[in-house]
Amino acid sequence: MPLIYATPGEENIIKKVGGSPDVKRHLENLGFTPGGMVTLVNVLGGNVIVKVKESRIALNEDMARKVMI
C-alpha cells in the first residue's frame, strides 16, 4: 500500500521504494530504505509530513505514492 494511505500516527515498515533510478536514489538519501520505519504525521491537501529516522520530511503526493508500506 502506498504511504499516502497510511494511518496517521501509526509506525509502518517500508516494503519498497519505486520510481525512476534518480527518484529512488533521492528517496533513499532522505532515509526511505526498504526495511526502515516510517510514520505518517499529517496529510495536508494530498501532501504528507512523515517521520523517518528521527527526522520530519514533507513529501508531495506523487513522491509519497512511490513509497510502499
Image (cartoon, rainbow, N blue to C red):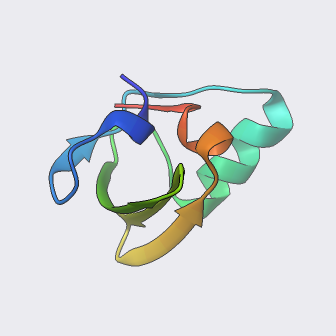
* Residue depicted at 21% across the width and 45% down the height: 7
- Near-viewer residue (46 or 9): 46
Q: Position of residue 41 (x, y in %)?
A: 31, 65
- Near-viewer residue (11 or 22): 11
Query: Looking at the picture, does residue 38 appear above or below residue 21?
Result: below
Which quadrant: the N terminus?
top left
Query: Looking at the picture, does residue 24 appear above or below residue 30?
Result: above
Count of labels in the image: 0
**Given the current orientation, which residue lies at the most extreme bottom position?**
55
Q: Position of residue 31 (x, y in %)?
A: 52, 58
* Residue depicted at 65% across the width and 58% down the height: 29
Query: Looking at the picture, does residue 23 appear above or below residue 31?
Result: above
* Residue depicted at 81% across the width and 27% down the height: 20
Which quadrant: the C terminus?
top left
Q: Is residue 18 left or right of residue 1?
A: right
**Res 15 quadrant in image:** top left
Q: Is residue 43 left or right of residue 66?
A: left
Query: Looking at the picture, does residue 27 appear above or below residue 1?
Result: below
Q: Is residue 15 left or right of residue 64?
A: left
Q: Position of residue 2 (x, y in %)?
A: 43, 29
Q: Position of residue 55 (x, y in %)?
A: 43, 77
**Given the current orientation, which residue lies at the most extreme front position?**
45
